[in-house]
């Protein structure tokens, strides 16, 4: 927010409310407050976009992107792993057209229902 | 779901309710009633200034700025942000916020009037002057230890889950009943420890009765002290006199210096009451801090109906505000250099503005705080002890009267003070003191119209100070963060 500079605590709360309402997930772009110098690694994010790391930081999948196909996307795209993703060749060629960079646009990976 | 842009493209934007102010060459907005403060810059500032001149449709705003070279996305985002922050309003009516009636609120503090007697006869005292409302016939002169302890039990009972409690000792002259104060402090400390809570104490005194024993006790139990004093000998002795007319300054000055030297475990503040004859704020502050050694001084115009000789008229109030402003500028200068200044009227106001309070009630009376009289009658606050209004029960017979309390809170909410509903200062003022309202207008729920100009003037000044500190030394504001 560069046009409104919060001066007091209430204004900072308003700012947080706006950011939350706009659904702006800053996630990996933020610095960690709890561990200075390290990346802010929120609960529910896989740190890696490479296959074999499809668990969240508590060891399960409940905190991952939903549906889990969004998490498996890079397994398929980056590594060619034939994961359970829509058929990019014939039946759902437009499936990932809106996803230019997975780290930013993973939400735009379409869900395809057969 | 439609975006903001789609829904509001047909509505005209205008600035939402706010109080603009300037400080350190920057523009600020104090949003009302949220109490949020923003520094306005760049496109955000320009959009607000544009619609301040006349309301404009969203498409017109976009066209105005895009024709001046701003990017479309930039303009749209700016408008959305200003809309969401409620800096702009498009006239789309929001559903009315549900009013949650304040049913009960855990008590945090009781103020015990341990005596209604005083060894001074200060002319302006609201307890003894012609404006007094307390009806003391039939009430004991001194609170018994038993009543005081019942008051402590009432506080504990009504505090629910609160961990931090507070007992303030008041009067009359509090130290006339030091024995009960002492036994109550010891009792409360013991009881609260049993329950795993914390407790703090404070008292207000005229300092005439301070002894070595009392000072040691205050220090041992970390009791906060407010000393009522009006300045140097000349100014103090105009109003603060013994019953024979003799001034009290020469008695209290050495005792105060001793107290300040020996009692270091809690704050000791001076409280000055201003009247038509005692109003030189800077001179008083200088004397109390440099000559006597107080770290903090708070000033308050005397509560007085217009008939009283010491009443401060409107013209004099303006002069006093100028006088406050002069001392406040000194506070500002210190703050910018990171130094503490003892003018507590400023620090108290800055704390509220920095927090961004939006108060439903002007103070804690009836909400987190209740007063208790010598006979054990519970009241709104210490100023309503034994008064015909503001009765809230009895420490032994029935405890807090929740029905009376609920009724009071429902009828004294800022929403009920109709005169206030368009004033920009209402988030911090909330209509002002109930006691002042009762003295001036005969009703506790009346808005204190006699000091509206003062309140707006003072808060505008403090906003400017806050703005300037936020630009020139923002780290200073961290002290208000807790």
Image (spheres, coloured by chain):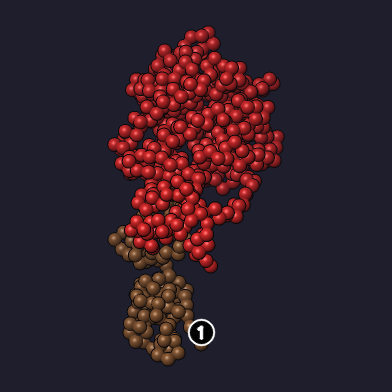
Chain colours: A brown, B red
- Vertical order, A30 against A109 (above or below): above
Identify which residue is drawn at 35% across, 73% down.
Answer: A103
Name the side, left or right, on which B229 lies relative to B105: left
**Residue under circle 1?**
A113
Task: Say whether residue B478 is visible.
Answer: yes
Most foreground residue, B122 or B156: B122
Identify which residue is drawn at 65% across, 27% down.
Answer: B442
Q: State the count of labels.
A: 1
| Residue B344, image x, y percentages | 42, 31
> How many residues crowd mark 1 within 10 Å: few (<14), some (14–19), many (20+)?
few
- Vertical order, B70 against A57 (above or below): above
- The single residue placed furthest to the bottom in the displayed view is A90
Most foreground residue, B132 or A60: B132
| Residue B353, image x, y percentages | 44, 41
- Vertical order, A41 against B80 (above or below): below
Task: Say whether residue B371 is visible.
Answer: no
Quarter in which the N terminus of chain A is drawn = bottom left
Identify which residue is drawn at 47% across, 20% down.
Answer: B316
Most foreground residue, B337 or A15: A15
| Residue B360, image x, y percentages | 57, 42
Q: Quadrant of residue B107?
A: top right
| Residue B311, image x, y percentages | 53, 19
**Tag 1 subunit:** A
Identify which residue is drawn at 57% across, 37% down.
Answer: B420
Label 1: state its secondary structure.
loop
């Amino acid at each position: 927010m560069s046009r409104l500079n919060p001066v007091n605590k209430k204004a900072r709360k308003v700012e947080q409310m706006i950011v939350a309402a706009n659904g702006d997930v800053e996630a990996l772009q933020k610095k960690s407050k709890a561990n200075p110098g390290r990346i802010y690694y929120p609960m529910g994010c896989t740190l890696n976009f490479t296959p074999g790391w499809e668990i969240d930081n508590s060891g399960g999948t409940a905190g991952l992107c939903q549906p889990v196909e969004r998490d498996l996307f890079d397994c398929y795209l980056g590594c060619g792993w034939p994961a359970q993703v829509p058929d990019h060749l014939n039946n759902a060629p437009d499936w990932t057209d809106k996803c230019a960079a997975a780290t930013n646009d993973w939400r735009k990976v379409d869900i395809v229902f057969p | 779901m439609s975006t903001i842009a789609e829904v509001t493209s047909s509505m005209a934007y205008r600035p939402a309710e706010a109080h603009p102010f300037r400080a350190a060459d920057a523009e600020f907005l104090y949003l009302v009633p949220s109490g949020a403060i923003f520094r306005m810059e760049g496109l955000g500032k320009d959009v607000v200034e544009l619609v301040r001149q006349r309301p404009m449709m969203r498409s017109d705003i976009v066209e105005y700025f895009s024709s001046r070279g701003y990017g479309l996305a930039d303009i749209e985002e700016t408008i959305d942000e200003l809309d969401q922050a409620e800096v702009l309003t498009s006239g789309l009516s929001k559903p009315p916020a549900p009013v949650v009636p304040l049913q009960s609120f855990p008590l945090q503090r009781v103020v015990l009037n341990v005596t209604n007697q005083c060894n001074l006869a200060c002319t302006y005292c609201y307890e003894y002057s012609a404006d007094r409302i307390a009806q003391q016939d039939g009430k004991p002169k001194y609170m018994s230890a038993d009543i005081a302890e019942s008051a402590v039990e009432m506080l504990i009972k009504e505090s629910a889950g609160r961990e931090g409690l507070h007992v303030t000792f008041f009067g009359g002259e509090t130290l006339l009943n030091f024995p009960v104060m002492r036994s109550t402090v010891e009792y409360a400390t013991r009881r609260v420890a049993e329950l795993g809570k914390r407790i703090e104490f404070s008292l207000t005194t005229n300092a005439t009765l301070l002894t070595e024993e009392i000072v040691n006790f205050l220090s041992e139990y970390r009791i906060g002290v407010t000393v009522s004093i009006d300045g140097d000998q000349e100014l103090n002795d105009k109003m603060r006199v013994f019953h024979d007319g003799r001034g009290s300054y020469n008695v209290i000055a050495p005792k105060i210096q001793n107290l300040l030297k020996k009692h270091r475990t809690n704050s000791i503040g001076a409280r000055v009451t201003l009247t038509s004859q005692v109003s030189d704020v800077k001179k008083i502050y200088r004397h109390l801090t440099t000559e006597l050694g107080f770290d903090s001084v708070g000033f308050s115009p005397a509560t007085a109906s217009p008939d009283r000789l010491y009443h401060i008229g409107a013209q004099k109030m303006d002069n006093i505000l100028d006088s406050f402003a002069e001392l406040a500028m000194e506070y500002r200068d210190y703050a910018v250099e990171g130094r503490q200044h003892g003018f507590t009227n400023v620090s108290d106001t800055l704390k509220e503005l920095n927090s961004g309070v939006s108060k439903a009630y002007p103070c804690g009376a009836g909400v987190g705080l209740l007063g208790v009289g010598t006979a054990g009658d519970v009241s709104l606050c210490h100023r309503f002890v034994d008064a015909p209004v503001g009765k809230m029960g009895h420490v032994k017979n029935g405890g807090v009267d929740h029905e009376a309390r609920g009724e009071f809170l429902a009828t004294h909410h800022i929403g009920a003070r109709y005169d206030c509903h368009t004033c920009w200062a209402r988030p911090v003022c909330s209509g002002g003191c109930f006691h002042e309202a009762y003295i001036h207008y005969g009703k506790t729920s009346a808005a204190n119209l006699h000091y509206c100009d003062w309140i707006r003037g003072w808060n505008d000044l403090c906003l400017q100070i806050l703005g300037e500190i936020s630009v020139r030394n923002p780290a200073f504001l961290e002290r208000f963060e807790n």
